[in-house]
Structures are given as C-alpha cells and as structure tokens.
C-alpha cells in the first residue's frame, strides 16, 4: 500500500509542474485522495460488501468532487489532475500510468446489467479535459484523447482522437493502408476500421489524403477531380510538416486542446490556402507596379481603359 502511495506521489510530482513538494501532493491533491478512497472502496466491493463500498465511494465523492464507482479497476500510478467532475463507471478499467484531466466521463451507452458497459484505457493513455468516452470498447496503449472529444468507437494504440464525434488521427510513422488492404466500401461505412472512413464510407480517408498512386490509376468522379488542388495542397503540407518534425523535437500532447495543430489535415490545407492567397496578392502588386513603370495608370486595382470599355457596354 505504501509502495503504491510513493509511486503515485512520484508520478504526480513528475507530471505536474505546479507541484512544489511531496507534502503538498499528499495533502492538497484531490486526485490522489480519490484514488486512495477508491482503493478502499474497491477492496470492500471485491469482498462482497457492496453497500459499504458504495458508501465509502460516496464519501470520497463528497470530499474530492470525483465520482469513481467501487467496481471500477484502476491500475498503478494513475494521475487524475484537478479532477473535479470526473466520472468513472462500474465496469471501466484504467491501466497503469494513465493521466485523466477534469470533467472526463468514462461512461456507458447500454443499460444491461452484467455487461461490459464502460471503456477500457490501456497503459499510458492521456484523456484531455472534458472528454467523454462512452461504451465498452478499448482505448489503446499511449493513445491520446483531446479536450472535449466524444469518443464512441475504439481508438488504436498510439493514435489521437479529437472532435465530436471523435475522429482518429493515426501516428505519422504508421503507413496508410493501400487500396488492396482497405476493406470493401459499404453504404454505411460500418465495416471500415475506425477513423479510416469518410462520412460516406466510400474510400479510406488516409489513402485519399495521402494521394496514393493507386488512386491516380483508377477513374474518379468529376467532383473528385475538382477537389484535386486541395489534395495537392494537403500533400505539400504533409511534406512540410514532416520536415519541421525532423528539425524540431516533438511537443507533448496538449490536454486542453490548444497545442500544436500539425496533425489536423484541415488546418494544414487552410494554412496553405492563406499562404497561396498572400502570394497571389504580392504578384498582383508587382504586376501593377510594372504597368505603372511602363506608363499605364492603375486606379484602385483597375485599368482606366477597362472602366471606359465597361461604360460603353452599359450605354
């Protein structure tokens, strides 16, 4: 018991830069208090003293603002930071070295007794503030769940889940599936791996975003060819991001959702479009300057001859 307490305190001291001393952690951290109370309540629950376990858990909730069902299983060195509003359900399982921030719910979507209704977090998972993980599925080891994400499907190991409903962003070093490896498309997309389908379930998102060669060889609808410039911009953004990651050390996961946005393809495309617009404006300014040097007068970005021609057409 005391060995686990020392591990918990050391983990908090390592993870929280606001921690000044071990005495402060022991006396002033509600996340640590909630874990200690839960161990007592869980021991009573396992011995069949269900009312006593629930009552001890209820006292812990009144003391810390963190509600952990005594039936939940929590591993070693779990850090609940701030913790107010955290709810952990009966069949939830939390692995070693997980970090959970305030307002997180590990809840269920089914009401049948005896079922696995709540999620399982494997070791090293980080769950950002306000995230909701709902269902009896597994979040893989060292995965990360962004702030205010609503996760209702399994998350692979090492991946990041963001948004509502959450979409899964795979690690950059994990290869995207090819057309031969991808499952056959369906109308609902239910048979596709999580995070690898578009809203229509027609083709893998990762393969489409990467612009794989197999897609160049197969005929595509007209709407897809119209979106080709965005795909090229996305591919350029991926290359620039890879160069930047090679030169700059990778930052830690931002549990409050305000960290790096390099993993979001939409943000990359928007940045590319903004840069492209700025380049076009600069080229237009240079063209106007060159015309003025040749003796042509430009007023408000319009040639006077164009204005006269337009007036004659109106008349």
Image (cartoon, helix red, strand yellow):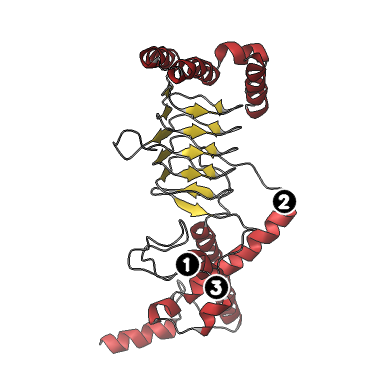
Report if residue 172 is visible in the image.
Answer: yes
Q: Nearer the viewer, residue 58 or 47?
A: 47
Front of the two marks 3 and 2: 3
Find residue 240 and report its horizontal and vertical position in percent.
Answer: 65, 63
N-term mark: 2 or 1:
1
Answer with mark 3 or mark 2, whichever residue precedes in sequence.
3
**Residue 116 placement (x, y as % from top left):** 39, 38
Do callouts 3 and 2 mark residues in contact (Cβ within 8 Å)?
A: no
Q: Is residue 281 visible?
A: no
Query: Circle 1: is it few (<14), some (14-19), or many (20+) Cα within 10 Å?
Result: many
Give the SS element for disc 2: loop
Q: Are marks 2 and 1 in contact (CB under 8 Å)?
A: no
State which tag comes first along the sequence, 1 or 3. 1
Question: Which numbered marker is on residue 204?
Answer: 1
Name the residue nearer the viewer: 9 or 243: 9
Residue under label 2, please give it: 248
Residue sitting at x 65%, y 11%? 23
Nearer to us of marks 2 and 1 is 1
Question: Where's residue 209, x and y in %?
Answer: 52, 67
Binning the other alpha carbons within 10 Å of mark 3 as few (below 14), some (14 to 19) or many (20 upward) gives some
* Residue in the foreground of this view, choosing between 76 and 217: 76
What is the quadrant of residue 305 in the picture?
bottom left
C-alpha gap between disc 1 and disc 3 = 11 Å
């Amino acid at each position: 018991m005391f060995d686990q307490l020392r591990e918990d305190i050391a983990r908090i001291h390592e993870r929280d830069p606001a921690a000044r001393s071990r005495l402060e952690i022991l006396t002033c951290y509600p996340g640590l208090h909630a874990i200690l109370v839960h161990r007592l309540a869980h021991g009573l629950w396992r011995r069949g003293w269900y009312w006593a376990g629930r009552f001890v858990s209820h006292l812990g909730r009144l003391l810390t603002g963190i509600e952990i069902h005594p039936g939940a299983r929590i591993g070693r060195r779990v850090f609940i930071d701030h913790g107010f509003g955290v709810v952990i359900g009966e069949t939830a399982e939390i692995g070693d070295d997980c970090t959970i921030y305030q307002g997180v719910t590990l809840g269920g979507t089914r009401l049948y007794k005896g079922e696995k209704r709540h999620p399982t977090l494997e070791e090293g998972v980080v769950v950002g503030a306000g995230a909701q993980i709902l269902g009896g599925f597994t979040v893989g080891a060292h995965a990360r769940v962004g702030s205010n994400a609503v996760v209702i499907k399994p998350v692979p190991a090492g991946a990041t889940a963001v948004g509502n409903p959450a979409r899964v962003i795979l690690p950059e070093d994990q290869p995207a599936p090819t057309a031969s490896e991808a499952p056959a498309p369906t109308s609902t997309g239910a048979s596709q791996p999580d995070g690898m389908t578009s809203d229509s379930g027609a083709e893998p998102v990762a393969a489409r975003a990467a612009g794989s060669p197999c897609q160049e060889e197969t005929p595509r609808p007209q709407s897809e060819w119209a979106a080709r410039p965005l795909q090229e911009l996305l591919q350029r953004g991926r290359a620039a991001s890879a160069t930047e990651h090679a030169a700059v050390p990778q930052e830690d996961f931002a549990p409050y959702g305000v960290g790096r946005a390099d993993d979001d393809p939409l943000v990359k495309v928007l940045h590319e479009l903004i840069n492209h617009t700025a380049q076009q404006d600069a080229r237009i300014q240079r063209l106007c300057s060159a015309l003025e040097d040749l003796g042509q007068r430009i007023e408000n970005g319009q040639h006077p001859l164009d204005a006269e021609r337009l007036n004659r057409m109106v008349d």
